[in-house]
Structure formats: C-alpha cells, structure tokens
Amino acid sequence: QVQLVESGGGLVQAGGSLRLSCVASGIIVSFNTMNWYRQAPGKQRELVANIILGGGTNYAASVKGRFTISRDNAKNTVYLQMNSLKPEDTAVYYCNAEHRRLLTNYWGQGTQVTVSS
C-alpha cells in the first residue's frame, strides 16, 4: 500500500521560506517520478516541480529560481524548498508519485501554504 504524507505547510509572510516534506511508504522515491502539485482556490491543480528517475528536475516557470525539489533516498522522502514566497504561491500543495511499473498515480492528502502580503 502506497502512502504519501506531506508536512511543512503553514502561514508565512511574503519573501519568506518554507520547506515541504513528503514521506513515502510502499514506493521507492528514487525509482519513480515524484511530483509536487498545487491547487489554489478556484483554480486547476498545477504541476510545480518534479524529480525523475535519474535525479533530473523540472520546474514550472512561475517558481523557477525560487523553489528547489530534492529527495533523500535513505529517508525515502521528497522535499520542496520554497524561497522568496509570494502571495500567489498560496495553495494546497500535494505530493504525487508516478509508479513507473504499475503505471499508477498516488496522491498525498495535501498541506496548506498561505503567503500573506
């Protein structure tokens, strides 16, 4: 059974930083693509960043240069370091795993990030 548990969200002022964590069980993060998505009220869920099998990373244009995705293979955990936060970064952030063998997507429960101006 795959479980993804996010943590690290909260309320921060514009310009501040937060680090989100996604602890995975039942799936090996280094063997699969791991994604961070976010969904703001009234908007569609969007891909923020991902880290692929070989360790390569990709970012949405809106967060490039401010956010960094990484993983700790020993802890089977994926992180999203968010710096220079803006009010428009306010959203629920979700961890997602793409199981490459089972061709199945798994989602965490989400963690709220609120950036005040």
Image (tube, rainbow, N blue to C red):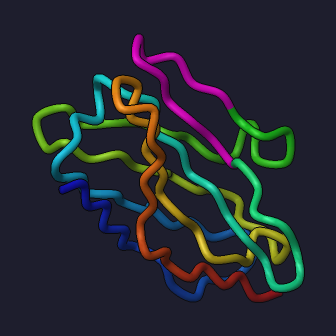
**Nearer to us in this view, 96 or 63:** 96
Residue 65 magenta-highlighted: no
Q: Is residue 50 above or below residue 9?
A: above
User: Image point 67% across, 64% down: which residue?
Assistant: 38
- Residue located at (78% from left, 40% from top): 60
- The residue lying toward the viewer, choosing from 5 and 10, is 5
Residue 68: which quarter of the image?
A: top right
Q: What segment carries the magenta color?
A: 48-58
Residue at 56% x, 51% y: name it.
36
Quadrant of the drawing holding the N terminus: bottom left
Q: Position of residue 52 (x, y in %)?
A: 48, 23
Q: Is residue 109 left or right of residue 74?
A: right
Indicate the position of residue 37 as horizontal and vertical percent values: 63, 56
Whole-percent x and y of residue 22?
A: 34, 57
Judge whether residue 57 is colored magenta: yes
Left or right, residue 21 beside residue 110: left
**Picture layout, residue 110 above or below residue 11:** above
